[in-house]
Image: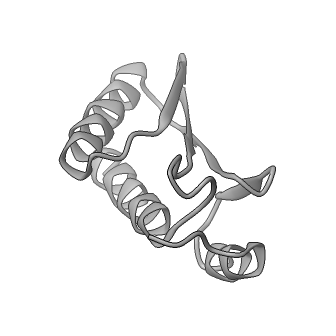
Amino acid sequence: MGRLTGEEIEKQLEYLSGWSLEDDRWLTKRYRFTEFLTGIEFVNQIAELSEEMDHHPFISIEYKVVTIKLTSWRAKGITDLDMELIQKYDSIFLQVTE
């Protein structure tokens, strides 16, 4: 899977709220929750999806804030798979916060 250019990434990020590109290599977003356990439920679902897709983000939990950082190691940057996954992460967030 080929690495996306910075321009391609920025164009796709225009439609994805809260995501940013760090160091031309990482997609990053901070998710805020009203309850700690809701954040943990979110992380558990992200972990299950990551195992299914064999593509794993860095996940940081700080009380009611979960930070996700994602890249494709083999491509040394962002690929279409990363863009697909961040959309799925946003969908999971909407499900657990309903």
Residue 60 vertical position relative to residue 25 in the rendered view, above or below: above
Residue drawn 48% across the image and 32% down it? 34
In the orientation shown, which residue stands out farthest toward the front?
74
Residue 92 placement, left or right of 34 = left
Residue 13 placement, left or right of 51 = right
Residue drawn 42% across the image and 20% down it? 36
Count every numbered label the image shows and give the total.
0
Query: In terms of image quadrants, where is residue 43?
Result: top left
Colour setting: one colour
Residue drawn 40% across the image and 68% down it? 84
In the orientation shown, which residue stands out farthest toward the right?
23
- Residue 15 position within the rendered picture, expressed as x and y whole percent measured from the top left: 60, 79
- Residue 6 position within the rendered picture, expressed as x and y whole percent measured from the top left: 76, 72
Foreground residue, 43 or 56?
A: 56
Residue 18 vertical position relative to residue 37 in the rendered view, above or below: below
- Residue 47 position within the rendered picture, expressed as x and y whole percent measured from the top left: 29, 35
Query: In terms of image quadrants, where is residue 89?
Result: bottom left
Residue 95 placement, left or right of 76 = left
Residue 79 vertical position relative to residue 58 in the rendered view, above or below: below
Foreground residue, 57 or 34?
A: 57
Residue drawn 51% across the image and 32% down it? 58
Q: Quadrant of the N terminus?
A: bottom left
Residue 92 vertical position relative to residue 33 in the rendered view, above or below: below
- Residue 94 position within the rendered picture, expressed as x and y whole percent measured from the top left: 36, 56
